[in-house]
Image (spheres, rainbow, N blue to C red):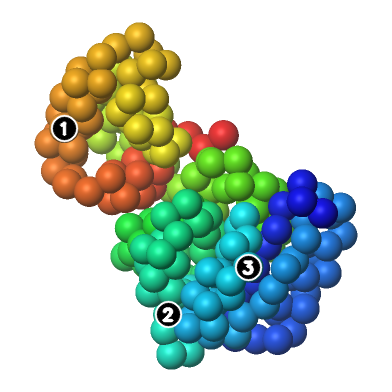
Amino acid sequence: MADKLTVLLVDDHALVRKGFRRMLEDDAAISVVGEASEGHEAVRLALELKPKVIVMDCALPGMSGIDATRRIREKMPGATVLMLSMHSEDTLVRQALEAGARGYILKNAMELDLVSAIKRVAQGHLVLDPQLAKPGALKGERASGLTPRELEILRHIVAGKSNKEIAAELGLSANTVGVHRANIMDTLGIHKTAELVVYAIRNGLVSLT
């Protein structure tokens, strides 16, 4: 049906895909429209089927999930990719977000709520596995360098909003938001939005709701 949330599953293990398909199709709102076992096939099927969400394994033979995501986003800028991985390293999370993924979920999570994660990324939310968020003892120290207004804007940046959208919501000009964004990055010594998002969540500067 046209109003169903269409999903493309990408994983090199057939049993994993079968398990995910069963899990997703238990939800009447979701339809799995295709499966791919490697990166090149994932790109081809994404362009052919145009699913609303692509569930992408990070480690794929041939072309990695991150490279496939980058290729898909280059050809379909509006594509929504949810990355699945066995690894929680900052570098991989950052690379996935920089490639255009809108979520990063750990496959070994005890309770992988894949249905909820897919629905949230489809709605435009950034979804990161709770195990990636480590608001440790440095939270207060790291946050002290930012003003309350900058922390508020940072929360909107993490939510994936543009300067224009943040400005409209907070009653500011887009230029003012741009200045705040630049100040936040300067204060934290970060120069890319994807790195800023990972850093903010890792250090508990914002909370994922």
Q: Position of residue 6 (x, y in %)?
A: 70, 58
Answer whether labels 2 and 3 touch (C-beta < 8 Å): no
> How crowded is the residue under tag 2: few (<14 C-alpha within 10 Å), some, or many (20+)?
some
**Disc 2 secondary structure class:** loop
* Residue type (three-letter) at the residue carrying disc 3: Leu
* Residue type (three-letter) at the residue carrying disc 2: Ser
Q: Residue furthest top?
A: 171
Image quadrant containing the N terminus: bottom right
Q: Position of residue 98 (x, y in %)?
A: 33, 58
Instruction: Classify residue 168 by image quadrant.
Output: top left
Q: Distance from label 3 to label 1 (Cα)?
A: 39 Å
* Residue type (three-letter) at the residue carrying disc 1: Ala
Which is more toward the observer, 112 or 179? 179
At horizontal 62% and vertical 55% (from top left) the residue drawn is: 52
> Which residue bears the numbered disc 3?
49
> How crowded is the residue under tag 3: few (<14 C-alpha within 10 Å), some, or many (20+)?
few
> How crowded is the residue under tag 1: few (<14 C-alpha within 10 Å), some, or many (20+)?
few
Residue 14 in sight here: yes
**Disc 3 secondary structure class:** helix
Q: Which of label 3 and label 1 is nearer to you?
A: 3
Q: Is residue 20 left or right of residue 180?
A: right
Instruction: Classify residue 12 by image quadrant.
Output: bottom right
Check the image and report above or below for 144 versus 190. Answer: above
> Which residue bears the numbered disc 1?
182
**Disc 1 secondary structure class:** helix
Check the image and report above or below for 92 versus 119. Answer: below
Which is more toward the observer, 199 or 97? 97
At horizontal 19% and vertical 21% (from top left) the residue drawn is: 175
* First in sequence: mark 1 vs mark 2: 2
Q: Position of residue 41 (x, y in %)?
A: 54, 83
Q: Distance from label 1 to label 2 (Cα)?
A: 32 Å
Q: Which mark is residue 64?
A: 2
